[in-house]
Image (spheres, rainbow, N blue to C red):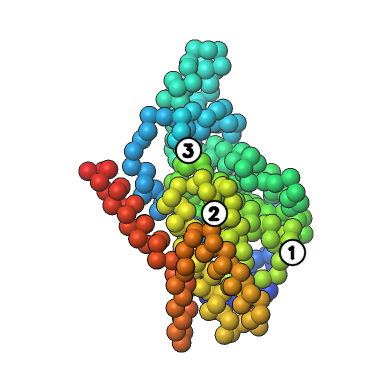
Amino acid sequence: MDDEIKGEGNSINYKFRMHDPRVGRFLSLDPLSKSFPWNSPYVFGENRVIDGIELEGLEYVFASDGKLIGKFGKSPKIKVASQDDLDQYRNGLLEPHELALCTQDINTASDEVKSNIYTTIYSKEVRRKSDKYKLEGGFVGVGAANDKIPPAQAYKSAEAQTVIFKESNSAAISVWSSNNNNYWDVASTLNHEHGHAYFELDKKERTTASQYETLVYWHEIDSGIFDKASESSQLNTRHKFLQYLSNLAHDLGSSKQQARDANLFVKYKTLYEAKFDIELNVYSGAATFSVYDPTISKRKKELEEENTNVEN
Ligand SMILES: [Zn+2]
């Protein structure tokens, strides 16, 4: 992921083709299996640190086919209602709060149900009318449920990814595995993956891996979706963004893209500082370069402590 991408600034200009007989087209894949630039290094598990209290209320309730039934209460959790309970609800035999109490957490649902729900979230929150690229298969996949995605070892460490099909101007977006049941965290992750498809297919950006992720992470951060995500999810995303911003500056010495790297570095550092009202610390050494937001680790620690207190 980060370390593996570092120093491979030209890796995405260097492609080979792999034929996938199941889809009958060519996939353009990065030959460096560990440095797919579209392989989003999300760790959903970390987002659960503040899942301390189960509020009585109630959440985003979906049918198993992915239809959003309604929002109940103020919690952003994703819940799935059974067909029986939905029938009773529609016949007036269950009140909305009773329906919500019967639901199951999305994490315990099948991959197919997850895929249906993620597709709804992508269509409702992420996809824009102006987007020209197509969503491969018309759905957001979930891990092995999405047979459009090559089962590469490289995906093991990722939680979501996008594979680009240039020939058909489409992108296969999938959540590889997830323990996250927060509606806005999922939407924010899908918005990140959307950014890969958008920059590569609609904008036809030719970039280095560091440039690419810096653009895509900023696309995710600079969005109303991000603003609604859980605080721990936001902190993780900010942290990843700053790692790629650091890589961008680190690449300056070795890459042929100095001018672009330098411009992007200044632009995105300025945008970040304005959005979060913080001055970033910048360290540079002979072999390292890092951009550091001192508020992130402090706040992460506080959240972990709050969570521990809740558990006790
Ligand atoms: Zn990414």
Q: Which residue is mark 3?
A: 76
Task: Please determine whether, in this image, residue 282 is positioned above or below residue 131.
Answer: below
Is residue 231 shown to the viewer in this render? yes
Q: Which mark is residue 160?
A: 2
Question: Which residue is disc 1 drawn over?
Answer: 204
Amino acid residing under circle 3: Pro
Side (left or right) of 270 relative to 133: left
For the residue pair 25 and 162, the one nearer the viewer reads as 162
The answer to whether 35 appears left or right of 127 in the picture is left
Residue lying furthest left: 312
Amino acid on which disc 1 is placed: Lys
Residue type marked 2: Ala
Give the residue at x 71% y 66%: 205
Mark closest to the chain's N terminus, 2 or 3: 3
**Does mark 1 have its CB less than 8 Å from ligand 1?**
no
Alpha-carbon span between mark 2 and mark 1: 22 Å
